[in-house]
Amino acid sequence: MLLILSVSISNRLRYITHLLLSNMLGIEVRFTTSPEEFTSYEGPKISYSREPLADGLFIEASALLFESKIFLREVKSSMTGDVPVLFMTGNPLSALTFDPFAASFYLISRYEEYHPFKKDNFGRYPVTESIAWKGKFLDVPVVHRWADILETLLRKHFPGLNFRHPTYRFVPTIDIDHAWCYKGRTIPRTLGGFGRSVMHGRFHEALARIKVLTGLSIDPYDNYAFINKVHEPYSNVPLYFILFADYGKNDNNVTVSSKEFHLLLRELDLHRGVGIHPSLSSGKHHQKLDNEYQGLCDVLDRDVTISRQHFLKLSLPKTYQNLLQLGITDDYSMGYATQTGFRAGIAIPFPFFDLSKDEVTTLIIHPVTMMDVTMKDYLRLSTDKSLEKITDMIRTVKAVNGEFVSLWHNESLSDTGHWQNWRKVYQEMVKLASV
């Protein structure tokens, strides 16, 4: 057991030490505010404070973990060797030149997203505002690097201390923004879509719609059998996040009352892997969110416990507070739509810490590593370049025993239109990530 001496034991300190030391390194931790108890303890111990409070290993503490309010603070990144760091320390007696606990808490709690910022077109926190982007370490799971530094330090001073690390895991996820390309719409929407295709000269599209609706061909987005076949050789089953919302500007799935749609959802939920994909507009209207959630629960005849935000739109802490009220236990929205990488600096699931209430919650956050739309539409990568980048990210996550969460859409696996040839990328990703 590792004993930590500090002047006070805050919620923030308990949270981040449990995550870094217990979850990531497998060390049992106990706290004390008594220098006498610390001095008499003969096992591994750390003094975490502004100045050394007693003998033993000393790590200089920043003020962040001893506060309970949110302050507008400017945090800059530096380098220690080849590792990006935050919260540099100045005490020559400190065993480290930075505070790994404060640095990790700052990124994982998304402290910077509680500051005022200029939202993007969808009301999201832009990646360009983040310290990871400015410091050019967004593609690095830096919290794991900091945990490695702590482990090296502890092994040196306490060679008898035992360590256990998480196990690598692949979690494939699919967003269902449009269950089908042509099926499942009301007659007015079907006629409107057909008319727009003809009006803009997309006659092949109009013909494809007719063939699907008359049963002469399969809907291009109806590729669930293909997805099952890709994953069949492996032990992973995709999670499906369903946009179960009334028709709107950015929320235009099939008609939620469609019996065929309901049948599809029950089939996808055979392994209880269906979650809610809250509409873009539900973020401002809690009753709308509640209606979407309850509607999906009614179709599946069970309580839904997993979620991912449409367009990856997160508004902290409100989004997560709303999900907690619904009974959501796990969310898969922690990523940027415009860039790949590690939004929270970490590649394993972690509990959401609500800075506004200064408390840890029961909601588990699963960081998203990559998204198909990011590769194709934002980064404008070819299929070959996308596969190269995905391969690098898989290696990165495997190296830290993390959780590789991929985000794809059923329409991007249609192998038609502007998504032609992307199926092979998905197939190769599943193969690489599954072994």
Image (cartoon, rainbow, N blue to C red):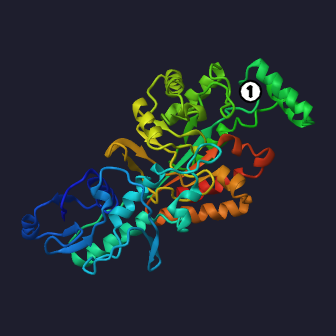
Vertical arrangement, residue 70 with respect to residue 148, above or below: above
The structure residue drawn at horizontal position 76% and vertical position 29%, both measured from the top left corner, is: 182
Q: Amino acid at mark 1?
A: Lys
Looking at the picture, how far across and down is residue 248, in whole percent? 67, 28
| Residue 215 appears in the picture as rendered | no
Would residue 30 appear left or right of 274 to someone viewing this image?
left
- Element under disc 1: loop
Question: Which one is nearer the viewer's eye here, 126 or 378?
Answer: 126
Would residue 86 appear left or right of 174 to someone viewing this image?
left
The structure residue drawn at horizontal position 80% and vertical position 28%, both measured from the top left corner, is: 212
**Total marks in image:** 1
The structure residue drawn at horizontal position 46% and vertical position 56%, both measured from the top left corner, is: 344
| Residue pointed to by mark 1 | 183
Looking at the picture, how far across and down is residue 229, in whole percent? 63, 44
Would residue 180 appear left or right of 33 to someone viewing this image?
right
| Residue 256 appears in the picture as rendered | yes
The structure residue drawn at horizontal position 70% and vertical position 63%, both measured from the top left corner, is: 385
Question: Which one is nearer the viewer's eye here, 282 or 431?
Answer: 282
Looking at the picture, how far across and down is residue 359, in whole percent? 31, 45
- Quadrant housing residue 49: bottom left
Would residue 101 appear left or right of 82 to someone viewing this image?
left
Looking at the picture, how far across and down is residue 175, in whole percent? 60, 40
Other-residue count near label 1 (Cα within 10 Å), few / some / many at <14 / 14–19 / ≥20: many
Vertical arrangement, residue 312 with respect to residue 82, above or below: above
Q: Quadrant of the N terminus?
A: bottom left
- Quadrant housing residue 23: bottom left
